Image (tube, helix red, strand yellow):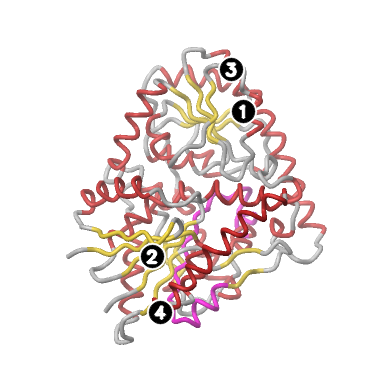
Amino acid sequence: MKNNILLPIEIITREIDYKLILAAMCSDGDSVYVGQHDYLYLASKFMTGGIYVGKNQFSIYPDGSWRDRHSKLKENGFNVIHLDEEGVFWGDDENHRQRLSRRIDVDQIENNDYICTWGRFQKNHYQNETIADSDNIVITGNPRFNLLTSQYRGIYDERVNELKDKYNDFILIPTAFGLFNNILGHDDSFSKRRLFSNKYNVEEYVRQVSEWNYSGKTFCEYIKMISSLSVEFTDLNIIVRPHPAENIDVYQSAFSSFKNIIVIYSGEVQPWIIASKILIQDGCTTALEAYISNTPVINFQPFYNTKSNTFLTSLVSEKTDKIEGVFDLVRNLMKGPCERKVINKKGVDLLINLKEGVDSFEAIMTVIQKNIHLRQGKGDDKINNILFYFFRVRYWIMSSVKNIIRVAFKEKREQYKAFNKSFPGFDKEDIKRKIEKIEKITNKRVNIKFVNKNLMVLTREK
């Protein structure tokens, strides 16, 4: 039986590598569609039957209402496997639950849908909040963390060596201040889309102001800390890697006079983490990736309150709230290997990947195979290639017209700039190089067809 398997991508640098590996692992004869999530959803309308793996069947309109793509996928015969990309939660357990409920429209989840969770905490929450079958809510972790383990990290060897040769010893500082330093401006930070509500709710607005305030204060302290770090450690390079949702201009302006500070957003973060001597962050998933790759982590958290604390990133880090404390930790960590942090049960309950020996690729593939088994006897999944061809032509024409028109509209230009940063399109040569390395790791031969910059189709050779 031939299956259509859809792997949507929102932020290409975050998701492309592990989804290419998943595509290589899929069965002979399956067509695996890997593409920008909006474009892939539009393409799904021309398919009859398939398996959709990702979080992007739900998203939020600017007015705070849900954009329901889930029901349309179900109407077209898709099995839906929900896998989230973001699971670092702020605050206490109640804050965690509230954030999980804001991640997806739980009312749309059906009894035959699968939900893959990062850990037991998420599983228990969704079992209480959705009508999905309890057996269909499965702890898998997220495969992107397995990319940093010895089994898979070899795909980055060449890039890691390039970074070490170019930047020598460096400290990596990935920032996560998209709420305050928003590439779309403060209007977006306080939009109903951000509030996950199309109704006025004073408590939600107060919550958003509080989070924006924390983000802003911490952002300013990080500018100060990075500048001071540059002066204190002139023999180290400092790589500042802004989140794709952030405005990079402020960093470039603030650090333009410091020779050993490089502001750059280039490629996947994993090789940067592996190549770095130390990673400094506050509330960023890169801390978890660094822990798994045995890169020392400093959690510089100049302000603290329960609702702004990120338990997981604190758990894997050496923590300080003072700039001088950062200096001391850097000196100690540069002396040699540090003792690995011991992760307690609560940490594993939030992210199963922190437990040794967990392979999320195998866990996700088990869920996909269960869905394939459920679809036995329904015939091959199909795609109407004629209608799909006309759709692609129309989409290209409309995109070309929009590119001309948006020049006259600043807001549209900025929105497109932000979109293009998250998903600039597939680099064919880079993808081909990755596939060659993935074939060696998985011991499976893969064929790849580039439909356009937004979509590619992978099949596996026997």
Which of marks 4 and 3 precedes in the sequence? 3
Region in magenta: 69-97
Q: For numbered disc 2, what is the local secondary structure? A: strand
Which residue is rendered at x = 48% and y = 68% of the image? 393
- Amino acid type at mark 2: Tyr
Mark in front: 4 vs 2: 4
In-front residue for pair 88/413: 413
Q: For numbered disc 4, what is the local secondary structure? A: loop
Q: CA distance from mark 3 to mark 4?
A: 56 Å
Residue 297 spot, x, y in % from top left: 47, 32
Q: CA distance from mark 3 to mark 1?
A: 10 Å
Q: CA distance from mark 4 to mark 1?
A: 48 Å
Instruction: Find disc 4 in the rendering and name its residue.
Output: 384
- Asked if marks 3 and 1 touch (Cβ < 8 Å), the reply is no
Which of marks 3 and 2 precedes in the sequence? 2
- Amino acid type at mark 3: Phe
Tell me if 20 is positioned left or right of 194 in this view.
Answer: left
Residue 66 spot, x, y in % from top left: 65, 69
For residue 69, the mark is: none
Which of marks 1 and 3 precedes in the sequence? 1
Q: For numbered disc 1, what is the local secondary structure? A: helix
Which of marks 2 and 4 precedes in the sequence? 2
In the rendered image, the quadrant that contains the N terminus is bottom left
Residue 449 is one of the magenta-drawn residues: no
- Asked if marks 3 and 4 touch (Cβ < 8 Å), the reply is no
Instruction: Find disc 1 in the rendering and name its residue.
Output: 252
Instruction: Find disc 2 in the rendering and name its residue.
Output: 33
Which residue is rendered at x = 51% and y = 51% of the image? 423
Q: Residues within 10 Å of mark 1 (few under 14, many from 20)?
A: some
Q: Residues within 10 Å of mark 3 (few under 14, many from 20)?
A: some
- Amino acid type at mark 4: Asn
Q: Residues within 10 Å of mark 4 (few under 14, many from 20)?
A: few
